[in-house]
Image (cartoon, rainbow, N blue to C red):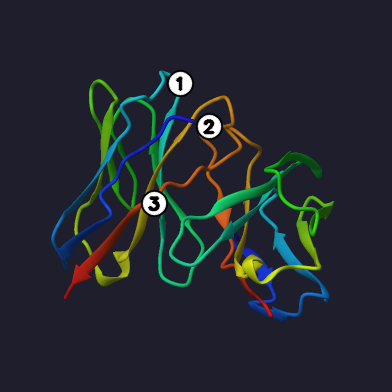
Amino acid sequence: DAKTTQPNSMESNEEEPVHLPCNHSTISGTDYIHWYRQLPSQGPEYVIHGLTSNVNNRMASLAIAEDRKSSTLILHRATLRDAAVYYCILRGPQGAQKLVFGQGTRLTINP
Amino acid sequence: DTEVTQTPKHLVMGMTNKKSLKCEQHMGHRAMYWYKQKAKKPPELMFVYSYEKLSINESVPSRFSPECPNSSLLNLHLHALQPEDSALYLCASSQIEGAFSEQYFGPGTRLTVT
């Protein structure tokens, strides 16, 4: 599986935008970029995914670099509830059933 | 209903006990998963069931025995566990496997082996 690299931790303030980076320089052309997050004492939850184009949903936006070697998860207006560990995961046709979690980024939101 | 439920929430068992973890979903998903998560670590895949058949076993020791009695239920039978098996056990489900399919996770069962 292609690997991802994320900062161990990030900190932001409530009601400000947050940009969570992910590097995936060995991504293949058929790998989807998925983001999940895990709030304290909960199971992971799906946030967003994309292949080539930028994606938006009610939770977040995903900006994918033109060469696809990096991506950024954007929380437009962070709340205290967004404090979680955010995982950037690549999923390709081989092993598509699997979610292979890396270490993720622990996001702290300051009130 | 987009919920995956897991019971029990907490379980303490001795090394000679036999116990089972239960997972249920009513979203019509045909793929179900068991993950193990140690403290301060990311989840690790253990098993995948696809259409009630075991499709992936990530070299999990035989003291963990999964079972999928029907498309809504997934069990994990535990026997002769070791203290290092203490962890959060997460169940997930998805509309069949695929690189674009979203997995829904339950809240997990926190297992302590004494």
View extreme (top): residue: A29
**Which residue position is annotated with label 1?**
A30
Q: Residue B23 shows which numbered tag? A: none
**Residue found 19% across the figure and 59% down from its top:** A77
**Which residue position is annotated with label 3?**
A103
- Distance between mark 1 and mark 3 Cα atoms: 23 Å
Q: Is residue B11 left or right of residue A48?
A: right
- Distance between mark 2 and mark 3 Cα atoms: 20 Å
Residue B23: image quadrant is: bottom right
Q: Amino acid under label 1?
A: Thr
Question: How many residues crowd around disc 2 within 10 Å: few (fewer than 14), some, or many (20 or more)?
Answer: many
Callout 2: chain: B
Nearest the camera: A97 or A51? A97
Q: Indicate the position of residue B62 as horizontal and vertical percent values.
A: 80, 53
- Distance between mark 2 and mark 1 Cα atoms: 9 Å
- Tell me whether the residue at label 2 lies in contact with that at label 1, contact meaning CB atoms closer than 8 angstroms: yes
Question: How many residues crowd around disc 3 within 10 Å: few (fewer than 14), some, or many (20 or more)?
Answer: some
**Residue found 41% across the figure and 18% down from its top:** A29
**Residue found 47% across the figure and 72% down from its top:** A41
Q: Amino acid under label 2?
A: Ala
Callout 1: chain: A
Callout 3: chain: A
The verdict on a common chain for dots 2 and 3 is: no
